[in-house]
Image (spheres, rainbow, N blue to C red):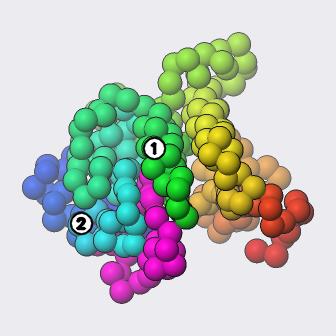
Amino acid sequence: MVRNDLVNYGHRYSEQEYATSPEMTIGLDPRELTLGNVLRDAGYRCGMVGKWDMGQAKRYLPLQRGFDFFYGHGNNGIDYYTHERYGIHSMFAGNSRTKADQGTYATDLFQREALRFIRESAEQSWFLYLCFNAPHGASSFGADEKNPKSRSGVQAPPEYVAKYADTKLADNLKHYYAAMTRNGCAIGAVLALIAEVKQADNTLVIFQSDNGGSGNGGNAPLRGPRARFGRAGCECLSSPAWPARSRGRVSDEF
C-alpha cells in the first residue's frame, strides 16, 4: 500500500510526474507469493476485480501475480465516476488502463465484471478476489480549490441516496449508507449467480473488511477510527460461509 503524500498539500500530479511517483514505481515485492499464485498452481482460474492496491507498474499487476483475469484499479482510492485518482486515470482492464467505462459508477462495474468472471469460469474450479472501492472516500479534489484538504467524500448513485432522503442523517452519512447499500446489492447479485450455476453449497465465500471504519458510519462501542491503534481501527468483521462443509458459529480467535 503506497501513497503519494503531496496530494495532502493540494499538489496535482501531471502524467509525467505520476509516472515516476511512488504510486507507480513501488509495489508488492515480486518475490512474494499471492493467493493467486498458490491457487492457480492448484488448478484454479483466478480473478481479481476492484481495488488491487499492490502496485500499478506492470510487474505488480494481478496478471503477473498469479491471476488470470483483472478489472479494477491499482491503488487505494479513485473517483467513483471518472475513475481517476486526483486527476490521473486509474482503471485497468488486464494490463492496460481503460476509459471505456468512464462515467459509470465503479460498484456497478465491479459487479458486472465479477458476474462475467463467474459465468466464464463456471465449468472449472475458480477463485475470485472481489474488492469494492466503496465506501472509501473518492480520491478526487473537492470544490474548494483553495483548501488542499478539500475532497469529494463518499460518492453514491442518486437513486440510492434518495432512499435516505427522509432520515435525519447528515449528508455525508446519507452518501455513506447509500454506497454501502449499493455494495450490498452487488454482493447479493454475486451470491445469486453462484446459486444459479449450482455452486452455492460447495463455494467458500468470505466477506470481510480490510480495516475498521473511518468514522463515517460509527465504530461504537470500539474506540477510534481506522489508521489509529484503537480497537475500532484494527478489528474488523470476517464472515465466511461454506454450506457443504461447515455450520455457522462465532469465533474471536483472530
Residue 163 in percent (x, y) is at 66, 18
Q: Is residue 12 left or right of residue 250?
A: left
Residue 79 in percent (x, y) is at 37, 39
Q: Quadrant of residue 23?
A: bottom left
Callout 2 amino acid: Ala
Local SS, label 2 = loop
- Quadrant, the C terminus: bottom right
Considering depth in this image, is 227 or 186 the residue closer to the camera?
A: 186
Q: CA distance from mark 1 to mark 2?
A: 25 Å
Residue shown at 50%/24% (left/top)? 157
Residue shown at 44%/58% (left/top)? 48
Magenta stretch in the rendered image = 26-54
Residue 77 in percent (x, y) is at 41, 49
Residue 34 in percent (x, y) is at 46, 76
**Eyeballing the image, is 79 above or below 34?**
above
Residue shown at 84%/70% (left/top)? 252
**Label 1 neighbour load within 10 Å: few <14, some 14-19, many 20+:** few
Residue at the extreme front: 123
Callout 1 amino acid: Arg
Residue carrying label 1: 116
Q: Is residue 86 left or right of residue 76?
A: left
Nearest to viewer (mark 1 / mark 2): 1
Local SS, label 1 = helix
Q: Is residue 63 left or right of residue 198?
A: left
Considering depth in this image, is 115 or 198 the residue closer to the camera?
A: 198
Is residue 42 something that shows in the picture?
A: yes
Q: Is residue 237 left or right of residue 141?
A: right
Residue carrying label 2: 57
**Eyeballing the image, is 45 above or below 117?**
below
Q: Is residue 194 in the magenta section?
A: no
Q: Earlier in the sequence, mark 1 or mark 2?
A: 2
Residue shown at 38%/58% (left/top)? 69
